[in-house]
Amino acid sequence: MALALARKYRPKSFADVAVQSHVAATLKGAIARNRVAHGYLLCGPRGVGKTTLARVLAMALNCERRGDAALDGEPCGVCASCTRIWSGASSLDVVEIDAASNRGVDDARELRERAMYAPSGDERYKVYIVDEAHMLTREAWNALLKILEEPPPRVVFVFATTEPQKIGQMAAPVLSRLQRFDFKRIGPADIRARLDRVLAAEGVTHGEDALAMIARAADGSMRDALSLTDQVLSMGDGTLTAERVREALGLVPEDEFLALLDLLAARAAGDVFAFVARLVDAGIDFGQFLTGLADMIRAQLAVTLGGAPPGVSDRVREALTQRAKAFAAGDLLRMLTAITELEPRFRKSGQQQLLLEALLVRFALIDHTVSLEAMLRGMGGGGATVTDAPVPRRAAPADASGSRSASPPAADAPATDWRSVVRDADRRAAERGDAAPLLLEEEAPETLPKHRGATLPPGPPIPDVSHVVERWDALVAALRGNGKTMAATALASASPIAVTGRGEITIGLDEPNAIYEKALDAQKGEIAELLQTAFAGVTRVTVRPAEGKASAPVRLTDEMVRTERLTAMRRKDPVLDRAIEVLDLDLAD
Ligand SMILES: [Zn+2]
């Protein structure tokens, strides 16, 4: 295949640009009704068809059959002019400028001078397509503004940009003279559908899982999807298999993930280090590994819950089905959460290997969930299985081993050792300036049960503030356990200020923070309920804004970003969402 797919299958008409039909239809209509503007601004992520659509517009404006009612604003796609513009051959009337490489005053001047030239024929339009327009200098924009204020006849400017806000800052007056269109990010389903058509036209056989993999890697960019496909096809005999895609993308082989799952199921924490060393030897990117691991764990979770994971090969589905009993759904959820939690700082960290090792060791040692699940089953009334792990309703502030249950494969001896290894690794990471908190937190305070409807351990009747302070961490954990992640985070940044004789507790934020304040206020009822179970005399909770500066907008913390991502993840992933609902698990644990 000599011609790159992206080029060979570049759309020739507005109708071809199906994904951006909202823009294509408007432009087509403008041409059919002869109401073309002098300037357009096409905004959107890379690879979604901005330049492509600009070219179709140029074709339509200059098509030899323009005005043909049958075409209804579309370019014919076959006349000499259409062909020339489509193929990117030099055309007097279509000028493409990459602003990233032409940003100076001279270029602006040249642009202006060239714009003064009329199109090459009476019926023709001169179309300037300026890519990466946000890279233009102020001088260039000033020159362009003059043109746009008094546009020469039959000259059209099309600006394409991934960052319209930069143009807004630099050249607001220009924006008001442009018609703006926002392009959509292209979803995996649309990408798969397009690849499917292209490959059919090429006579290339392919597996659905291979397409899914490419669609995901392309991350919303059709151009990337097509060039990835090119890359894979250039490597082999013209078939597109998942294995080959994996290889071309430098993805971690599925078998590595399966091997890791086995290692975790066997609680072989000590093998983690050899495993990671193997990844290092293979030159595998840790960030990509983490993403792939999350995908695999999510797939395992789906299988464990009796569902069918999307975008997974039959072979892997089968392998996961064999492992369905090796993990409790809660364990898998916790792993997913831990990965999501780690990701933001993982990307920035210079200690990725250390962080990854510590994470995997922690996975191998997960040991609280079985009792938690047994408890949930017991509460849910579904189960005959409560007996296998009796859990106190009012969790005694027990020694950790008491609440731990007989978890799947035995091997308790090495656990203690590895725990200290991880703590040690965490400490070292912290010392080396991995800004974030420790990876292995001390075991969550077990003084509070982690699910909705449970009660706090009994405390003295009417507290003074210091009593409440003593219980603060447990309160935060309980709120978090009830799924009120944001409020829990806010609560951790707040303190009890006063308790009135009527049992009214006032909470104050340590620092002004409008978002936290709102989160606390929204959950004050629940906070009061939780407090009531510990301190019978508590009647209500009020939130007092912090004093000092007015509550200004605050910088997003990692925690807030994480909460957002989890919410997004749940929205995107019905299996995960249902699992959280059903098990009512603590996602931010
Ligand atoms: Zn034509």
Image: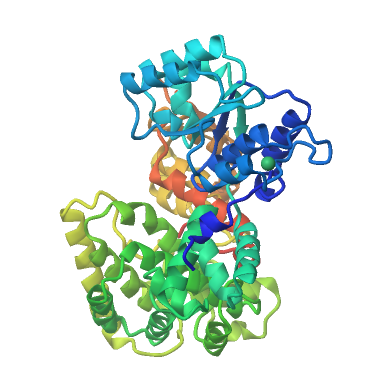
Q: Is residue 160 above or below residue 49?
A: above
Give residue 10's position: percent from left, percent from top: 58, 52
Location of residue 289 (image quadrant)? bottom left
Q: Along the line of sight, which residue is nearer the eye, 181 or 364?
A: 181
Residue at position x 27%, y 85% in the image = 414
* Number of numbered tags placed on the structure image: 0
Camera sees residue 557: yes
Give residue 556's position: percent from left, percent from top: 42, 38
Q: Along the line of sight, which residue is nearer the eye, 420 or 556?
A: 556
Q: Is residue 430 above or below residue 269?
A: above
Give residue 39's position: percent from left, percent from top: 58, 23
Ligand 1, image quadrant it occupies: top right
Residue at position x 61%, y 57% in the image = 572
Residue at position x 40%, y 71% in the image = 248
Camera sees residue 336: no
Residue at position x 52%, y 61% in the image = 5
